[in-house]
Amino acid sequence: MKKKIWLSALTLVSILVGIFYYMQYTANVQKEEYVQSGIPIGKEYIRKHYNAEFIYKNYDFIGGYVNSTVYLRGYIKGHEGQIISLNYDYKKKKVLYVTGPDWFIDSQDPKEDVSIP
């Protein structure tokens, strides 16, 4: 009888661990899809509004349970040591905000409306 209880408990723990790892895997796959959808949008945004070529390096999700923003980080071609960050809303599929060094932010095309609605 004791063997049966231990076997049932071990089976239950194994199933729960498997479910946990599956949930982690699917969450990571979903995040990667958000990032991959944002990279070309971010590159096009930088090209259009700053007349520059954005090179993507990495990403960060901060408070993903609170908002739908992913921070895409990279640099401008020729300025590898200076980080540019794009705040990308993956639900709306649009760039919300760009941060970086003053020389870059000041290079924004003044004819383009980049205000946040």
Image (cartoon, rainbow, N blue to C red):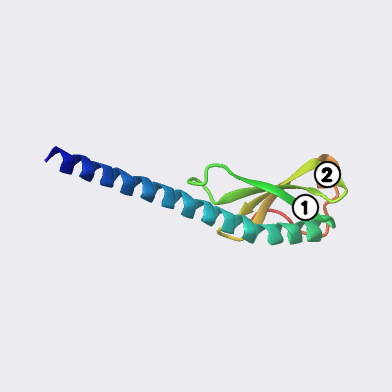
Q: Residues within 10 Å of mark 2 (few under 14, many from 20)?
A: few
Label 2's element?
strand
**Image location of residue 109, percent across then percent down:** 84, 56
Q: Amino acid at mark 1?
A: Ile
**What is the tally of numbered marks visible in this picture?**
2
- Alpha-carbon span between mark 1 and mark 2: 9 Å
Residue closest to the far left: 1
Q: Residue at x 84, y 55 (%)?
A: 52
Residue 84 visible to the viewer: yes
Up the image or down, 88 lies above or below 63; here it is below
Residue ID for mark 1: 55
Residue ID for mark 2: 80
Q: Nearer the viewer, residue 68 or 81?
A: 81
**Image location of residue 41, percent across then percent down:** 69, 61
- Residue 17 is labelled as none
Up the image or down, 99 lies above or below 89; here it is above
Residue closest to the far top: 2
Q: Amino acid at mark 2?
A: Glu
Tags 1 and 2 touching, CB below 8 Å:
yes
Residue 100 visible to the viewer: no
* Horizontal relation, residue 88 to residue 65: left or right: right
Q: Nearer the viewer, residue 24 or 117?
A: 24
* Horizontal relation, residue 59 to residue 103: left or right: left
Q: Residue at x 16, y 43 (%)?
A: 4
Q: Quadrant of the N terminus?
A: top left
Q: Residue at x 48, y 52 (%)?
A: 25
Res. 90 image quadrant = bottom right
Q: Residues within 10 Å of mark 1 (few under 14, many from 20)?
A: some
Residue closest to the far right: 78
Q: Earlier in the sequence, mark 1 or mark 2?
A: 1
Q: Residue at x 83, y 44 (%)?
A: 80
